[in-house]
């Protein structure tokens, strides 16, 4: 018979859906923040982030972010940038 003691602590962190992260070839990640809206045009700004723990489809973001809206769906449908 085996006995074990397991201690689980609550861990709170800021996170976003995994679909909001763009994984780059060098192993880093970036997200897109809403820069501004002008008529029907939407301008996004890419920001490099450090990803942490994952739970379900949520990913912890360790990088401090400005208080802007985050693009959470459609990241891989954006046109490539140079």
Image (spheres, grey):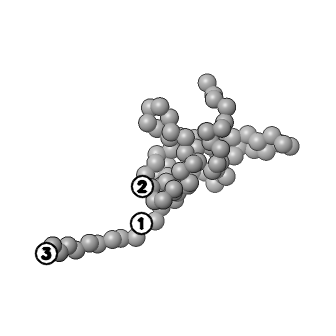
Label pair 1/3, CB-CB below 8 angstroms: no
Q: Residue at x 50, y 39 (%)?
A: 23
Examine the image and state in which quarter residue 8 appears. bottom left
| Quadrant, the C terminus | top right
Q: Earlier in the sequence, mark 1 or mark 3?
A: 3
Examine the image and state in which quarter residue 4 appears. bottom left
Horizontal side, residue 51 vs residue 20: left or right = left
* Nearest to the observer: residue 19 or residue 13: 19
What crowding class fits label 2: few (fewer than 14 Cα within 10 Å), some (14-19), or many (20 or more)?
few
Q: Residue at x 46, y 52 (%)?
A: 62
SS label for mark 1: loop
Residue found farthest to the left: 1
**Can you identify the residue that label 3 sits on?**
1
Q: Nearer the viewer, mark 1 or mark 3?
A: 3
SS label for mark 2: strand
Examine the image and state in which quarter residue 42 appears. top right
Horizontal side, residue 68 vs residue 5: left or right = right
Q: Earlier in the sequence, mark 2 or mark 3?
A: 3
| Alpha carbon distance from label 1 to label 2 | 10 Å
What crowding class fits label 3: few (fewer than 14 Cα within 10 Å), some (14-19), or many (20 or more)?
few
Residue found farthest to the right: 39
**Can you identify the residue that label 2 sits on?**
53
Q: Nearer the viewer, mark 2 or mark 3?
A: 3
User: Residue 11's mark?
Assistant: 1
| Alpha carbon distance from label 2 to label 3 | 33 Å
Q: Residue at x 51, y 57 (%)?
A: 58
Label pair 1/2, CB-CB below 8 angstroms: yes
Query: Which x, y percent locates residue 44?
Result: 69, 40
């Amino acid at each position: 018979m085996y006995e074990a003691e397991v201690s689980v602590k609550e861990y709170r962190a800021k996170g976003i859906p995994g679909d909001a992260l763009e994984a780059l070839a060098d192993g880093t990640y970036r997200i897109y923040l809403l820069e501004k809206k002008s008529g029907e045009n939407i301008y996004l700004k890419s920001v490099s982030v450090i990803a942490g723990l994952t739970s379900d489809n949520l990913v912890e973001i360790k990088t401090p972010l400005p208080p802007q809206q985050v693009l959470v769906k459609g990241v891989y449908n954006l046109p490539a940038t140079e």
